Image (cartoon, helix red, strand yellow):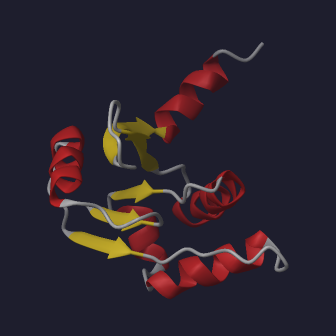
Amino acid sequence: MILINFSHPITKEQESKIIALAGQSIETMLTVPSQFKHDIPFPEQITVLIDSIGLSPEDWQTKPILVIPPGFSPAAVTLLAELHGRMGHFPSIVRMRPVSDSNLPMFEVAEIIDLRSLRDKAREDRR
């Protein structure tokens, strides 16, 4: 799979947990620095950011892609909208969480969320 990280660099321990949860190896890991400027519209910044990754339209639509979204929620949801447009579906994402009982700011991999399945289930629940 291709792991695209729009957040902080991950540790070997976090990488191992992602592999275990995903059930497949990481073929390519792309770390994409994601600093957002508040005076420029986020959609413009996200498009430039995604274009900088260099994947082809075919890659976006056919390769298994897992995403670690940025921690800043307006950027994360804008990113997901852009990715949905390019991929034709929502990607699965890695949710990080603070390590409990740690005196230092440390994060661990909490889960992988399959946004496509979540969306499909939610559609079934519509009335």
The N terminus is located in which quarter?
Answer: bottom left
Q: Where's residue 82, x and y in %?
A: 64, 64
Where is residue 84? Give x, y as percent: 59, 57
Along the viewing direction, whichever of 64 and 92 lies nearer the viewer: 92
Residue lying at 51% horizontally and 39% vertically, measured from the top left: 115
Who's the residue at 66% across and 15% down the image? 125
Residue located at (48% from left, 78% from top): 33
- Location of residue 119 with respect to 45 vertically, above or below: above
* 35 up-or-down from 80: above or below: below
**Which quadrant of the rendered structure holds the C terminus?**
top right
* Up/down of 9 relative to 92, above or below: below
- Seen from the viewer's position, the closer of residues 33 and 54 is 33
Residue sitting farthest toward the front = 103
Using the image as rendered, state which of residue 49 and residue 108 is in the foreground. Answer: 108
Residue appearing at x 41%, y 39% in the figure: 97
Q: Quadrant of residue 60?
A: bottom left
